[in-house]
Image (tube, rainbow, N blue to C red):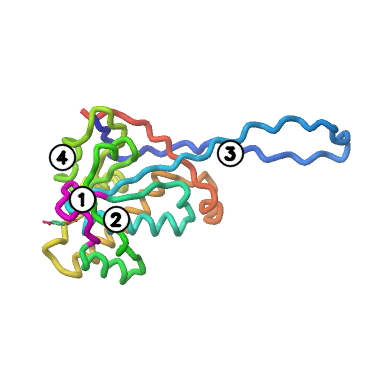
Amino acid sequence: MSRRDPAPPASKPSASKSSASKPSASAPPASPSPAPLPPSAEPEARIGVLFVCLGNICRSPLAEGAFRRVVAARRLEHRFHIDSAGISDFHEGDPPDRRAIAAAAARGVDISGQRSRPVRPGDFVAFDWILAMDGANLTALDAAAPDHASAHVGLLLEVAEGRAKPVPDPYYDGPAEFAAVLDTVSAAAERLIDRLLPPPPGARPADEAQDGRVAPAPKRRST
Ligand code: 4NP
């Protein structure tokens, strides 16, 4: 079963690294045989985030592009593994819909290199968060989740903002609806990163950019 969480709880900040202390003026001279180095710190794990819609040509590519932009703006690319996928394989191998590409390009986001792919069973283990655009996507994800799934599966807007609302499908609409989707997923992206990787208390923006913290969201089983 996959795990369903409406929103990750606020996390405690992880313990900050101790800074190396400088020798005091009265310290004895350095020993000729240096002390062994402490074990190197564990590399910080990447948080896997997969955005999912029906065709992976409109909403989830925009969500992926918006989230990548926020992550890049905060210089946190090294902390995330980001992708998008579709419930269906209708458009497998296709670039995003030209209207989605245009809406993103109008805001300086290039999603033209993305290619549609269907959700795969391995995604439920490879990603920490699988975020659906609407309830039908969520139902399909639940049905597709293998028994050994470990990912949290939820609605994007519910996980990011606590709003159990869908991202409307713009496929049969026009440029204004695609732009509205980009607005929606861009706002959600800002909230999502704040929840997945909250800055340490008292951090200034410059600190946030250099040292994000992992929110150890406790996983709980869906009912
Ligand atoms: P998406 O939009 O799920 O946001 O990528 C759609 C893409 C394709 C279709 C419907 C919605 N379709 O019917 O092919």
Question: How far separated are the C-alphas under marks 3 and 2?
Answer: 32 Å
Element carrying mark 1: strand
Q: Residue at x 38, y 35 (%)?
A: 217
Q: Position of residue 206 (x, y in %)?
A: 55, 56
Task: Characterize the magenta stretch by its predominant secondary structure.
Answer: loop
Q: Earlier in the sequence, mark 4 or mark 2?
A: 2
Q: Earlier in the sequence, mark 3 or mark 2?
A: 3
Mark 2 CB lies closer than 8 A to ligand 1: no
Q: Please tell me whether residue 88 belongs to the stretch shown in magenta.
A: yes
Q: Earlier in the sequence, mark 4 or mark 3?
A: 3
Q: Please tell me whether residue 31 belongs to the stretch shown in magenta.
A: no
Residue 100, compared with residue 43, is above or below; it is: below
Question: How far separated are the C-alphas under marks 4 and 2?
Answer: 19 Å
- Residue on which the image places disc 4: 139
- Residue on which the image places disc 2: 63
Question: How far separated are the C-alphas under marks 4 and 3?
Answer: 40 Å
Q: Which residues are magenta?
A: 85-96
- Residues at circles 1 and 3 in contact by the CB criterion of under 8 Å: no
